[in-house]
Image (cartoon, coloured by chain):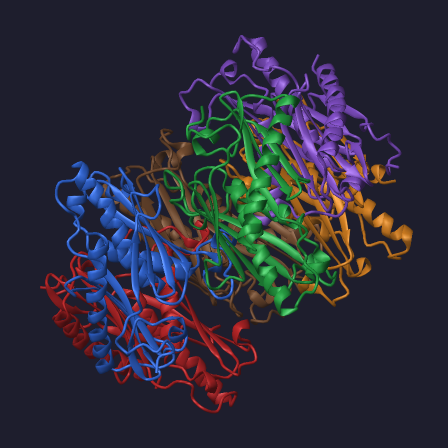
Chain colours: A orange, B purple, C green, D brown, E blue, F red
Amino acid sequence: MRPSGRQLNEMRAVSIETNVTKHAEGSCLIKMGDTHVLCTATLEERVPPFIKGSGLGWVTAEYGMLPRSTSSRMRREAAAGKQGGRTVEIQRLIGRALRAGVDRVALGERQITIDCDVIQADGGTRCASITGGWVALRLALNKLLKTGAITSDPLISPVAAISCGIYAGQPVLDLDYPEDSEAGVDGNFIMLGNKTLIEVQMSAEGSVFSRDQMNELMDLAEKGVEELAAAQLEATA
Amino acid sequence: MRPSGRQLNEMRAVSIETNVTKHAEGSCLIKMGDTHVLCTATLEERVPPFIKGSGLGWVTAEYGMLPRSTSSRMRREAAAGKQGGRTVEIQRLIGRALRAGVDRVALGERQITIDCDVIQADGGTRCASITGGWVALRLALNKLLKTGAITSDPLISPVAAISCGIYAGQPVLDLDYPEDSEAGVDGNFIMLGNKTLIEVQMSAEGSVFSRDQMNELMDLAEKGVEELAAAQLEATA
Amino acid sequence: MRPSGRQLNEMRAVSIETNVTKHAEGSCLIKMGDTHVLCTATLEERVPPFIKGSGLGWVTAEYGMLPRSTSSRMRREAAAGKQGGRTVEIQRLIGRALRAGVDRVALGERQITIDCDVIQADGGTRCASITGGWVALRLALNKLLKTGAITSDPLISPVAAISCGIYAGQPVLDLDYPEDSEAGVDGNFIMLGNKTLIEVQMSAEGSVFSRDQMNELMDLAEKGVEELAAAQLEATA
Amino acid sequence: MRPSGRQLNEMRAVSIETNVTKHAEGSCLIKMGDTHVLCTATLEERVPPFIKGSGLGWVTAEYGMLPRSTSSRMRREAAAGKQGGRTVEIQRLIGRALRAGVDRVALGERQITIDCDVIQADGGTRCASITGGWVALRLALNKLLKTGAITSDPLISPVAAISCGIYAGQPVLDLDYPEDSEAGVDGNFIMLGNKTLIEVQMSAEGSVFSRDQMNELMDLAEKGVEELAAAQLEATA
Amino acid sequence: MRPSGRQLNEMRAVSIETNVTKHAEGSCLIKMGDTHVLCTATLEERVPPFIKGSGLGWVTAEYGMLPRSTSSRMRREAAAGKQGGRTVEIQRLIGRALRAGVDRVALGERQITIDCDVIQADGGTRCASITGGWVALRLALNKLLKTGAITSDPLISPVAAISCGIYAGQPVLDLDYPEDSEAGVDGNFIMLGNKTLIEVQMSAEGSVFSRDQMNELMDLAEKGVEELAAAQLEATA
Amino acid sequence: MRPSGRQLNEMRAVSIETNVTKHAEGSCLIKMGDTHVLCTATLEERVPPFIKGSGLGWVTAEYGMLPRSTSSRMRREAAAGKQGGRTVEIQRLIGRALRAGVDRVALGERQITIDCDVIQADGGTRCASITGGWVALRLALNKLLKTGAITSDPLISPVAAISCGIYAGQPVLDLDYPEDSEAGVDGNFIMLGNKTLIEVQMSAEGSVFSRDQMNELMDLAEKGVEELAAAQLEATA
């Protein structure tokens, strides 16, 4: 039995509210149950030095948690004087995942920065950041398409991410914090809307896992991504 | 004429939504027009080393801006590796202001940290942080009073802050960003609900000012604080 | 009764020795009683990037305390790896205050950096830094006027700063350290020589204050600035 | 055709030289072709604060590359003033992977730190670090078993890691640098000697991948781990 | 011919003014020509952790240059966020040199920190710091002897330092900045008053040197130290 | 009697293995007994800004110790977030020493960076770094001479370094760690192959020393450098 009473293959309620801030070129507030992440897209007409002159665009991401987004207050990273290892790992993942769904030639030499700031955390913040980040990206690109700054859509398909894990010996979809902190194995699957894989990260946290279990988790993830991609398309329709 | 069409002595619309996050002991989302700040209060049963054993409590604050809370994206301070001078100055101000309205004996040896995170900025974020921060503090203390952890209310009166300045040669109340960036003189007044002064900060930014102008600004500020204190009391009633 | 035996409206003895170091374009050692600050002005024929090409000059300041300028040794900020919040706040204040008294068009595209290093501290170091900093600035500009590098004097009037506060229930002028550490309210007034205001900073430190008290403090400050401006003019005559 | 002329499922030559430094409790120099990593194990009779008193042991890891281990010189991280995101990610992975193969109760309250320093890099340094790190760990634990400090072996099975990827459209085992820099998809599989999974990390780098391809890569990885585990056991026999 | 017109074996005028700051337990302003260094001694009744309980005392030093102590302004190290390599090297040298002249048993478990802050620089600041630092140390210990806190004098003899070098092909004593910046070889000799050696540092800066030249430089240094020790004893008599 | 049983004037066994890494332009692994240092030379066709356009080349060095190169594990400097004072001092010394043996005009506008990484430490790592660093430099320059990129050899003579000290009252050559940690006086001599001096660093560590002792140490050092220079020439023949 899951603490929330959900079925093993049941995701939390997803809601995606778009255009939540007046300054960003694209933005949304994504909620996966009690996990709330504010995602904004910032468009700049310049690219990092390493691709200058290549004709290619760039998508990057930054991630942060508000100090009291968690049950007990976390130290503010700006005050600590650096981003922790977990933060760096997550923001590299978000950027890499979103880039996998972007035609960088069509984007042209411009950069889009996706900021994912966790307002309230209850497990699965990196997955919510990717899923919501794609929505912010979609909205920013819609503006570019509308003004004619770009003529071909750089987005191939939604990029969505979902966590899975083995909780109390059972494979479960979309772990919330109580599950996440107890799971023996957990990880994240990132896919395009058609379930082609972008990234798989599965880790033992106390107990190892078999190849059969890996396959069961991937089945769950495919179901989750299908639902998320539908929500992304609906929010940006 | 003010860019927003407001009267010289007219504040922006204030809204204070309370209990906006499930983890914090107290929280609110304060909106002063398009300036939106999320304020949370974290209660800890420990105090900083320098007052250990004194029987006194402590209230401190931290401040941050989401990277895209502003018109063009700011560098994330956690990524830059330190809090900028402006941030440090503001969070010291918030803490000092709120402490002035707290009976630290009644609070007892515990610490309350007020986090003020700017979701969207349009001028006056430090004042909104103080005003909203007091609401979060009030709510956290209500819990302590309710459980009987403290028996005497440590809060003397609301603490509210408002900006004033000289814009286009006229004294105006509650500057928004277009005014703030053009004002020749601006500053902040922090008061208790009864208009007793806690802090006055008035700066020339291009033009100096006379003692008469200082007095006109203080009149405006008193009007503003009166309205803010009413909103604070209503939100926490 | 003040610990020093001074009258409520009596400033400490002021002395300003000029040209105390052979390298700087302008310099002085200002003493306000036992508070001694070495102020130097460095002239550079370049401006910060944000005003390049604007035709405007820039004045900025840095502040530091020698580790044993204080009663017990402070940690050296260079060793600690960063300037503390108080230092940053003070040096931003010094720069802002001095710029308010400079005609940046007349200065032309050059930068003057005022370094204020506290040799011995006994309260009021930021005010002494501003007052002495103006003297160093004046001397550096005199050289530019003399060589004909600039033809119109960029300095409108002396800029002087003085602290006031409420000590033992009484408004007093120019707090020394024993007063400063006990004062319920204190702050700084920065003015041009004609007593026009540049900056007002008044803070409750334990007790709040009324508008009447604010006015009494401002009266004291005007008296102090008058005396300081005379000393500045005499030193640079 | 692979640049090295290897078969698709052919690993590079593996060599593991043990006891290569006189100070460490365990050490080896692992070579996977031209990738050379020096792994040392340091034993300390203390644990990190978060598990003090729990009776459990801890295994952690640090990773570094010598500046000229690579084709063009990398900046020394100590000089840069921080470990880069990639370094932090890798050392967290090494520690997590090795802990998954350790019975922390049997280890008792002591900490083993595995340092993995890349002497020469040609792709696959994180996998070589894990595989070699386990050997250093094994040797350090052998000493503890020999002295009787611990009586039950904390190591369940070898922990080995191997990279796989899709290069020129083909699934290949153990990518070297020329392959790694061109691969459309690559990742790492970490397993126990019996091929139970500890961690799976598969990333698209330019092209996405199907579930069938994922399965082919996992088949290759199982072959690789089998060979590595044999080499680990032989080196520590 | 030396730029200053001095003889090859002629030191600059030395002056040592004592008790120049009211807070420090010992202090002096040492001038070697145009090189001026403020030296203070801070006494603390605690020692660094690595000698706690040993019964031994500790003497350490910190060094800094005011930003405009030099001909062109140096970046403030506190603003740069770290002490440069040269600074660290110098302060380690000062501490090591002074400790060599201290009987740490007689000192007992207390620490004395010598701060050497360069007010004006014209070559030889590290030597002036050591020579002046010893005076500050002497004065602080005199207080301890006077109060009876220590009964046996921990200072064996003055510690003095002087630079020598090969300038325009000639061995010269006490290089000033114009000489120092042109010297092919230079270095520092640190000795007790009786000319026993504490530290020798001699470096080629453009031209190498023979053992005969080394001996000539040492002769010069002995002369310099003799004069400095006399000045130190006179200042502290 | 020396702990190792060596004669007072007997150096440890020296071995220099060249071309130990495939990426660097020059490299060697130097062993002085149990002290092992990996030295690599990196050639870049650019120079630091301060000599751009001067026609002169530059040689610089960086130094590091692997965390477990020592008897108890040292903290990794990259993790600590900065290079310690000792590291900075040593790498400045290595660079300065090697530059003294280079004709920077013949080198032309290019930079060579010598990385010295201590694999195993047993005293004398800075001297081994200089001696081995020269070998790496020699090998890199041989390549430039071979390709005709430079036509005149920038290396005048080997640069070698050796430690000496007073151990148990006796002058000894080439201190190993047990001697180094007990020596009352120790230091380093850096010379060209013909024994002309480049740098002398001699420090009291507990006991001071006479000029006669200084001379005895220099005699020992000359013997050591003679042997080292022979080994350097043999290794690079």
Q: Residue at x 44, y 53 (%)?
A: D229
Residue F37 x, y percent position in the rendering: 34, 67
Res E215 quadrant in image: bottom left
Residue E140 x, y percent position in the rendering: 25, 45
Is residue B189 shown left or right of residue B12? left
Q: Can residue D219 be seen at all in this image of the molecule? A: yes
In the picture shown, does residue F161 fall above or below A16? below
- The N terminus of chain F sits in image quarter: bottom left
Q: Can residue A182 be seen at all in this image of the molecule? A: no
Closer-to-camera residue (A15/F216): F216
Closer-to-camera residue (B73/F33): B73
Residue D205 x, y percent position in the rendering: 67, 57
Closer-to-camera residue (A149/F186): F186
Is residue B119 shown left or right of residue D76? right
Q: Residue at x 49, y 80 (%)?
A: F57
Residue F196 x, y percent position in the rendering: 27, 82
Q: Residue at x 44, y 40 (%)?
A: C33
Res D112 quadrant in image: top left
Closer-to-camera residue (A226/C94): C94
Is residue E95 shown left or right of residue C118? left
